[in-house]
Amino acid sequence: TAGTYKDTLLSMSGCDSVITLTLTVKPVLQATLNQEICEGSAYFFTSKYPDLATAGTYKDTLTSMSGCDSIVMLQLAVTEAPDTTKILANICLGSTYREHGFNLTPTRAGLVTECLSISRGSGCDSTVMLLLTVIKVPDTIRLFDKICLGNTYTNHGFNITPLSAGIITEYLYLMALSGCDSVVCMVLHVPEVKVEIVPSTFDFCDDHHLTLTAVSPQTEFRWNTGEQESVITVSNSGTYSVTAFAGGCTATDHYTIEPCSDFVVFPNAITPGNGDGLNDYFYLPNTSDVNKLSIFIYDRYGKLVFSSHDKHFQWDGRNQGKLLQGVYSYVAFIILNDGTEKRFTGSVTVL
């Protein structure tokens, strides 16, 4: 018990000695701790119990600062942690996975593992493990083709109707076996093909021939007369058409020459060389209104091969008895009965 105590002792010299003791009694400290840990975790209590992982009551005696023992008691509870949840999913490279609380945009193909901790009311987190298979998107397929303006391109799953010439680029998204889209890029060339027939004059009946020019950026032509030049000369009325070609595409234009009311019409071909006795002469069929006529026929070099001042002339395609086969041009000067003077030019083919 704490207090002051005195006693008299006999010293070595034979005299009494008085001893006084003042005694202090310090209390023993006691403490109780209540702790909770999640299953799989460990709790450090004291050096005697550094890694506690089992629920229970633990007691240890420690030395206080006063030098007296202190008793510490631990009440340890272990809360069972939820099991880890595993999620298996697939995604295409370049897409974002936003399910189950994740927000993941993979940057490479293959298996990507990502964990997410979810806090529970017990204070212990549960874990969601995402096993994400990232599928590489098939490479873009580039195709090149061409089509004529006005047609519809339906190859390879496309449906393209160009509205103008040039280069058209279209994309088609297809579902691959992996579930990811594959891309087909079509680069379509639409050639510009155009043609217009331009006449040398609009008064065909004055000269009875007309030069027609196919105006086009193309260089390949075909007329309904069979000619393949860009410029032709015609001496008959009717409808003339030309087709321009470029890369398998075509463009066509038409030009119509109305019949002349003039009675002066020369034939454009004679056949004295076939021996059938028909169509053997170049002449003017109708001369009833003609007072005077002069005609001059030239070869392609400008040499005069025939001339006449008789309105009833007939040329059998010969010069000095020799048959001249080929194309020849003529100039005719006519004075009608009413005094009107007319000049006619054209060509005749001798066969």
Image: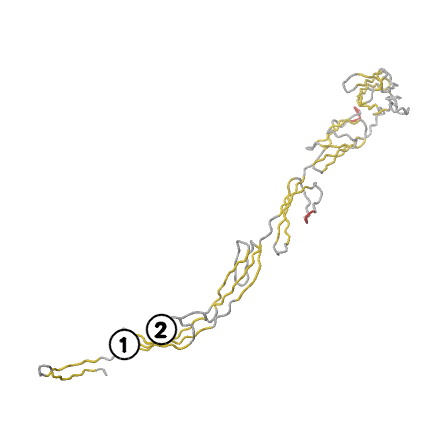
Q: Secondary structure at mark 2?
A: loop
Q: Which residue does the numbered mark 2 point to in the structure image?
A: 48
Q: Which corner quadrant of the image does residue 227 belong to?
A: top right
Position of the C terminus by quadrant: top right
Q: Position of residue 198 (x, y in %)?
A: 73, 30
Amino acid type indicated by mark 2: Lys
Q: Look at the image and tell me in which quarter the N terminus lies.
A: bottom left
Q: What residue lies at 74% left-to-right and 28% top-to-bottom?
A: 231
Q: In 3D space, how far apart are the residues under numbered discs 2 and 1 (Cα atoms)? A: 18 Å
Q: Which residue is mark 1?
A: 68
Instruction: Tell which of 66 and 214 is nearer to you.
Output: 66
Horizontal relation, residue 31 to residue 280: left or right: left
Image spot of residue 88 (x, y percent): 56, 62
x and y, in percent, of residue 18 in the image: 13, 82
Circles 2 and 1: CB atoms closer than 8 Å? no
Q: Nearer the viewer, residue 273 or 166?
A: 273
Query: On the picture, is 17 further left or further right than 301?
Result: left
Percent coordinates x, y for residue 278 in the rendering: 90, 25
